[in-house]
Amino acid sequence: MEIIKIIGIGLIALILIIVIKQYKPEFALYISIAAGLIIFLLVMDKLSGIIDLLMNLSNKANINKDFIIILLKITGIAILSEFAISVCKDAGEAAIASKIDFGAKIIMVAISIPIIASLLEMILKIMT
């Protein structure tokens, strides 16, 4: 069970962070980042399986692959930015975290423009 590995890595990192903060607080952030990257690497197989499944379903349903790719990019941006935001908050930098959050939201909206435009075109065709 992969969730047990993930929880184990998280708890080990937590214990290390608590102990190391007493002696070298600057290393606590490095442990947090390393634990996050290890957990991310553990779930990469699941992520690639999800992407393959979505691409197969889009082929069967005759959905434009570009839209699926855009949705996957937006999901990736959300996941990565949430990781960066958490690291910033752990480091006590809430101001930087909020700026990353703002930037990620703008990028997600900008990437979604083709989907929004396509939906508006379909609405206009239906209305006329």
Image (spheres, rainbow, N blue to C red):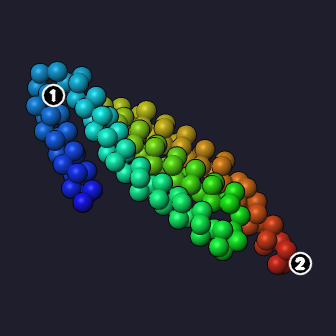
How far apart marks 2 and 1 lie (CA) works out to 65 Å
Name which residue lies at 42% across and 45% down: 82
Task: Say which element carries label 2.
Answer: loop
**Residue 103 in view, yes or no:** yes
Name which residue lies at 55% across and 47% down: 105
Which residue, given by chain and number where applicable, does mark 1 sit on?
21
Q: Position of residue 106 (x, y in %)?
A: 60, 45
Is residue 105 rendered to the left or right of residue 12?
A: right
**Residue 86 in view, yes or no:** no
Is residue 41 rendered to the left or right of residue 123?
A: left
The image shows residue 65, relative to residue 30, as above or below, that is below
Which label is found at residue 87? none
Q: Look at label 1 and name its amino acid.
A: Lys
**Closer to us: 18 or 49:** 49
Q: Nearer the viewer, mark 2 or mark 1?
A: 1
Quarter of the image for residue 39 reads top left
Name which residue lies at 14% across and 27% down: 20
Which residue, given by chain and number where applicable, does mark 2 sit on?
128
Q: How many marks?
A: 2
Q: Position of residue 120 (x, y in %)?
A: 77, 66
Q: Position of residue 112 (x, y in %)?
A: 66, 54
Q: For label 1, count other residues whose C-alpha is less than 10 Å away and answer few (under 14), some (14-19) or many (20+).
A: some
Q: Earlier in the sequence, mark 2 or mark 1?
A: 1
Name which residue lies at 54% across and 60% down: 52
Give the quarter of the figure containing the N terminus. Answer: bottom left
Task: Say which element carries label 1.
Answer: helix
